[in-house]
Amino acid sequence: MSEPQAASKSARRLALWIMGGLIAVAVPYGFLASRTYRDFSAYVKATLDEPATPPAWRTTPLSPEGCVEAGIRWLDGCPGEAVFCEGGFRRVVRECMAVTDRGAWCDGQDKGWASTHFGYTECEAKVAAETDKMQARLQDKYCPAGYRVLADLCKARAAEAPR
């Protein structure tokens, strides 16, 4: 066998090993991701789309801070990947806020919602008060995200208001 043929055969063998390794990793990951998404979809259906009993935040008006907390509690039980659950978190906060008119609350913020520091003090206090490390981590990550949802709702309301 000539030297170029041996190199070609060696390169093909290496390529087959690489492809086999990729398949060995991709197939189990695909099954895991599929199962995780199925569990997440079932959770969304049971808690948001078709709950046996509506969650309290859908039937009883909560304060905006309470809506952020409701979103964090929903997120705490979410079995999916963070990227899946974050969309549901935003949905919970938006739907909770929609239970009652929030115009007076938004107006009372004096456009504080336009600041990147909106909700910072409240979130900082919640994280500091939390004794459970995992709950503190959830508060630290998602409390500011919840306040961004509140700010977006106020911003949209202000954009709709007649000038």
Image (tube, rainbow, N blue to C red):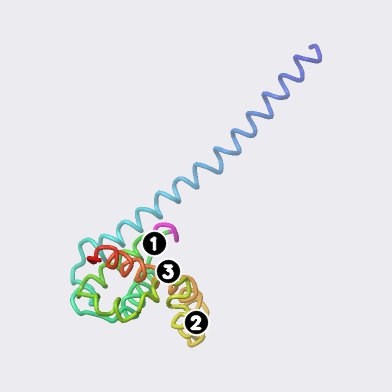
Q: Which residues are magenta?
A: 81-86
Q: Which residue is mark 2?
A: 124
Q: Which residue is mark 1?
A: 85
What's the residue type where badge 2 is placed? Glu
Q: Residue at x 81, y 15 (%)?
A: 3
User: In terms of secondary structure, where does tag 3 sit?
Assistant: helix
Q: Give the number of the mark in front: 2 or 1.
A: 2
User: Front-most of 41 and 126?
Assistant: 126
Q: Which residue is mark 3?
A: 145
Going by the picture, which residue comes out furthest to the right? Answer: 3
Q: Residue at x 40, y 76 (%)?
A: 112
In the picture provided, is 62 more to the left or to the right than 4? left
In the rendered image, the quadrant that contains the N terminus is top right
Q: Residue 50 sits in which quadrant?
A: bottom left
In the rendered image, the vertical position of residue 135 relative to residue 3, given as above or below: below
Separation of disc 2 and disc 1 at Cα?
Answer: 22 Å
- Residue 135: which numbered mark, if any? none
In the rendered image, the quadrant that contains the C terminus is bottom left
Crowd class of label 2 (few under 14; some 14 to 19; many from 20; radius 10 Å): some
Percent x, y for residue 88?
A: 34, 62
User: In terms of secondary structure, where does tag 2 sit?
Assistant: helix
Q: Please report whichever mark, 2 or 3, sits nearer to the chain's N-terminal start.
A: 2
Percent x, y for residue 148?
A: 40, 69
Q: Residue at x 45, y 51 (%)?
A: 32
Percent x, y for residue 9?
A: 71, 20
